[in-house]
Amino acid sequence: MAGVKNFTVKIIIFVAGINLLWEPTAAQLTVTQGSDMGLTPEQLVRDHLVGKGVSMFNVTVNGSGGIISKNNIGYFNATGGAFTQLNMKGGIIMTTGKADFAIGPNDKPSLGFRSNTGSDPDLEQLTGTVSNDACIVEFDFIPQCDTLRFRYAFGSEEFREFCGHINDAFGFFLSGPGIHGVFSNNSINIAHMPGSSEYVTINNICADPSSAWDNKDGIFFQYDAITYVYTAYYIITPYMTYHLKMVVGDAADQIYDSGVFLEIGSFSAGFDFNVRNVPMNPGAGIDAIEGCNDIAVEFSLPQVAKSELTVDFTLEGTAIPGIDYSIVPSSMVFTAGQDTGRVIIHPIEDGLTEGNETVILKILKKTCYDTITIWDKIIIRDYIPLSVSAGNDRVICPGDTTALIAITTGGVGPFSYSWNSSLSNDSIIRVSPSQGSHTYFVRVDDRCQISVSDTILVMVDTLAVLTNQPAEKTICSGEKTGIELTSNITNAGFSWDPLPVSGSVTGYASGTGKTIDQKLDLLSSTSGIIDYRIQVYGRGCDTTGSIIRVIVNPLPVVELGDPVTITSGSATELHAGSGFARYRWSTGSNDSVILIDQGGLYRVEVENIFGCIDSDSVLVLELGLNIPNAFTPNGDGLNDYFRVTGLENKENVILQIFDRWGILVFETRKPENGWDGTCMKKYCQPDTYIWIMKIGAPYNKTLKGTITLLK
């Protein structure tokens, strides 16, 4: 890249030792070296060292970019006890002799090999002594983040017998923008003792026994001691070009081997990325829905990738890949030039009701500062089939408005609605159709592009009304209403509720049926009014509030009194009372008073101004008596007695005679025998006397009169 400085990291190991014979033994450390790898330097570094966030190029081993032939470099794998001791599962091994000499057991105290690969000036500057058998790996790289780091361990046959004498060392020489070091190309060495600025050398390790573990008589490794895993790191500028030189070589002699284990994938700068869930059908919401909505797990970089970048993840959750959703890869790969990539979670439509299930992506994010785990959760929902009901068919009355409500179940909302008779897109419309039958159609679309429809029949029926005319009736107290209810439709039903308006009326009640036939009584002399509120039931189109008014008028009251008794030849008046509009006697008279002179049953019918009628009868008894008005008790045989004749067959008759002062002078129960005019057995004085005669049943009559006693 033009205008960008190249930086170099160089790792150097100096080993003094003796080249001894090595016999391969079965071990949990395996090494593939030199031409056996069949790899170029770029392939070796890419596959066995470089991790995330780093794009590397211009890779060489000892200055060559061709197929590696020297056995001083290779790649290793550690399992079982070897992995436990080394704490690395694999990576690159750089040595001063042969790479596979690192394989145990530790049964040769001075194993080594002369690789004759020359020296390195930076390593000699670092140790202050001559270097031999240098293994040098160099490459340019572009980091995606601001911290470069990788893990390594240093082992050697120089431990512990040559501490303070042969100061084998190695170096990671980094150069690039903003770096101003003392080594070639202004590089710095980033291989430091833990927590110190001292470089990693044999002498510095020997000075700190806790920095390495002793491998004496070890079975997995040949080296006498190996450091614990160290981490080299440096703060750099993202997306700039840097250079790294890693060098290991023998110091002073070419005898004892030393080697550096570089952990696979640990050479990384980390790269930042964001994760979000993007619904492929945004209207359906943020959840995955079978047959409706896929969820794209979108990974995005802050800048386009300079080289291939990989985001690893594992799948967890209750949903099963291949059964509940389509198989997805276990990583997201950004190719050079990309800044966005997606993993599609496609739920499989199986028609089963399973409830909500989850897909959880456990995403490893190697940031500039740390490796963190991102948990991305996607909910998979069943698609519940969409259905709609416009409701039951209905009957309404002319002029009425009815609400049509589309009720949806299932599907994925929000829903859109369309009716055949309205521009409204609501689930509820209000219609007021004309008389007749009308079919309404509603279509519902959900966010999964599923459509369903339903219809509803609205019939505008004839309004059932009361047709009674006139809507008022007048009756007299004690009469029945006798109202026959009628409607404009056949088989109409009726109900009524009476509402008293005025007057004191009894006998009314609520009821049903076509006839109101209630006997109403008026308890006062003033007319009363009852309004019957009628409800007419048709075929669902009913009316209420129709009124039939009943006016209850008072009856006239006529009383002719008790039976009347007259004597033969006499007359009496019968009075029907005044104030009536009409009179009708059984005699044919239309007067209020009639004069009668004969016995018999007399009946009168009267009518008041309301046309109400009352009647009464009276029995007139004709006694047929002959009662004189004077007599002469002088003994001449003529009119000597006051005698009443015509009393035959009349029982319980009493005759009493009183003088003018009210003194009883005579009494008899046999008036037919008469009074002889005596008082206290003496003849009474001539005068006018009062007589009272009481006649028992059936006449029950008391007669009064006067009799004159003459001499």
Image (cartoon, rainbow, N blue to C red):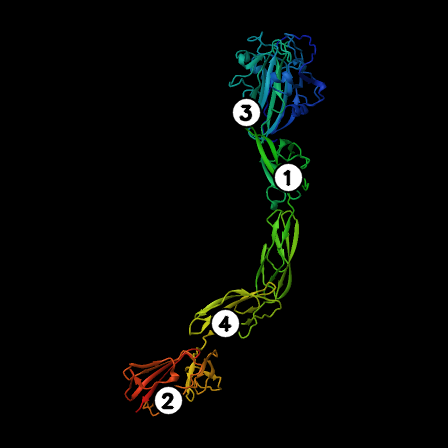
x, y percent for residue 590: 46, 86
Residue visible at 63% across and 53% down in the picture:
389
Q: How far is disc 2 from disc 1 in space, using C-alphas? A: 127 Å
Q: Does the image show residue 301?
A: no
Q: Does the image show residue 167?
A: yes
In the structure shown, which secondary structural element does the residue marked by tag 3 occupy? Answer: strand
Mark 1: amino acid: Glu
Q: For the residues labelled 3 and 4, say whether their Cβ atoms are less than 8 Å apart.
A: no
Residue visible at 65% across and 38% down in the picture:
344
Q: How far is disc 4 from disc 1 in space, using C-alphas? A: 68 Å
Q: Sequence order check: which comes first, mark 1 or mark 3? A: 3
In the structure shown, which secondary structural element does the residue marked by tag 4 occupy? Answer: strand
Q: For the residues labelled 2 and 1, say whether their Cβ atoms are less than 8 Å apart.
A: no
Q: Sequence order check: which comes first, mark 3 or mark 2? A: 3
Of 648 and 396, the residue lying toward us: 648
Above or below for 217 versus 384: above
Q: Sequence order check: which comes first, mark 4 or mark 1? A: 1
The quarter of the rendered structure image containing the N terminus is top right
Q: What crowding class fits label 2: few (fewer than 14 Cα within 10 Å), some (14-19), or many (20 or more)?
A: some
Residue where numbered disc 3 is placed: 234
**Which numbered disc covers residue 549?**
4
Residue where numbered disc 2 is placed: 628
Q: Sequence order check: which comes first, mark 2 or mark 1? A: 1
Above or below for 53 versus 214: below
x, y percent for residue 101: 66, 13
Q: How far is disc 3 from disc 4 in space, using C-alphas? A: 107 Å
The quarter of the rendered structure image containing the C terminus is bottom left
Q: How far is disc 1 from disc 3 in space, using C-alphas? A: 52 Å
Q: What crowding class fits label 4: few (fewer than 14 Cα within 10 Å), some (14-19), or many (20 or more)?
A: many
| Left or right: 2 in relation to 666 | right
